[in-house]
Image (tube, rainbow, N blue to C red):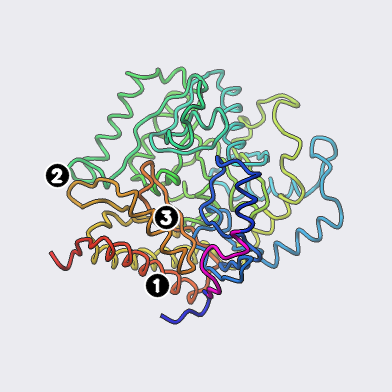
Amino acid sequence: MERKFVRLQTEIPGPKSREILERRNKFVPRGISNNCQSFVKKAEGALVEDVDGNHYIDFAGAIGTLNVGHSHPRVVKALQEQASQFIHTGFNVMMYESYINLAERLCALAPGQFDKQAAFFNSGAEAVENAVKIARKYTKRQGIVSFTRGFHGRTLMTMTMTSKVKPYKFDFGPFAPEVYKAPYPYVYHRPEGMTEQQYSGMIIEQFEQFLVAEVAPETIAAVVMEPVQGEGGFIVPDKAFVKRVREICSQYGILFIADEIQTGFARTGKYFAIEHFEVVPDLITISKSMGAGVPISGVIGRAEIMNTPGIGEIGGTYAGSPLGCQAALTVLDIIEDEQLNDRAQVIGERVIEKMQLLADRFEGIGDVRGLGAMCAMEIVKDRKSKIPDKEAVGKMVKEAAKRGLMLLSAGIYSNVIRLLMPITITDEQLEEGLQILEEAVEAVYQNNQALSVGGE
């Protein structure tokens, strides 16, 4: 297929990237992983150019950070204007109005017909940490419940709340106390012969038993749930489960916290993914695409809860920086003006259609799923056993990179291909990227002589 957007001048990584890579390996620890071995020179929209002149289509979006695309002109302009006025004063030293403007807008957008407040921080993990602090302060309880396969960050508390042991937790203990893992639905791996409705009922029952066998609900400060599990493999729960968890939280005075770090800001076709489930959380954590690549995060929630900590008990030196606030305000303008919630739905429909066509051809594609433009396909050894095929996914990511497409894996077994392309991607760019994805899948299965569904 002739490429319009992808232009490969050298092998990947090219000579300049390899030279820098040698320096990276000498001076930067190996613990910081790098999905792509090339070094960026310029990025705009859904396109990236590396230092060797190779041009890529980005289906990774800096792990979901770039819903409005790389270097959106309006974001760049807002940052330039802010930097020309002042870069930082520290909100706890001298305040700036952009912080207030952002809090006001997000409180208006967040679900719930009640007074809200918002506080801003630096990273997603820091937002979750502060949500936990606020919940404990408000409820006077210690227990925190997260879910199997969930991901919430790499700090001590959020690492404890996260499920995947390697690479996130191995040898990094001891972990924070009073953190418990509850079951989370995974429809694709339900017992054979069980309907989705029956399975949902079983998981709900397991959650209710969990509150008897593992931890008393009266001791729990908060339940923290990703409306769609991100790192866990883009797993979408059913509405009945989410609603029941919310009901139980309300029954026992437990705060319901929606972790929208990866799902927020139009990724699923709504500002917040929790809106799909007709559930109103007490607190919402946000980050990633909130700042279009500028570090900023936040917690939005009921005013009486958010206002519980005393003066100086939450905050940070760079928390809610002026650059981050201006970027976030501009992101909200772009989402509204460019109708990105609607666009996410269109992208998602096309991506799911393409993935399903691939699944019709290849036995190794066990499941295709998604919500809005948060789409994934799970790769298995075969559909009967559903054994995860991490090796095949690794090869697909490499084959895609060789052809100029940036991809990410996910799942606790790293056997899921997840797509997080900018929602501003054009139709032509999307189609070219999907064609490369198809070629990468074909290359892996043809090389492995994998069984095609059509050849059974």
Residue at the image position 44 percent from the left and 66 percent from the top = 347
Quadrant into which the C terminus falls: bottom left
Secondary structure beneath label 1: helix
Q: Residue furthest bottom?
A: 2
Dot 3, crowdedness within 10 Å: few (<14), some or many (≥20)?
Answer: many
Kind of residue at disc 1: Gln
Secondary structure beneath label 2: loop
How far across and how far down the image is residue 284, in percent? 55, 40
How far across and how far down the image is residue 319, in percent? 72, 39
Query: Mark 2 sits on what residue?
Result: 193
Q: Is residue 106 magenta?
A: no
Of mark 3 and mark 2, the one earlier in the sequence is 2
Query: Mark 1 sits on what residue?
Result: 435
Dot 2, crowdedness within 10 Å: few (<14), some or many (≥20)?
Answer: few
Mark 1–mark 2 CB contact (< 8 Å): no
Mark 1–mark 3 CB contact (< 8 Å): no
Secondary structure beneath label 3: strand
Magenta span: 7-18
Residue 395 sits in which quadrant? bottom left
Instruction: Give the overall secondary structure of the magenta segment.
Output: loop
| Residues at marks 1 and 3, CA–CA distance in whole angstroms | 16 Å
Residue at the image position 61 percent from the left and 59 percent from the top = 39
Query: Mark 3 sits on what residue?
Result: 418
Residue at the image position 26 percent from the left and 54 percent from the top = 366
Quadrant into which the N terminus falls: bottom left
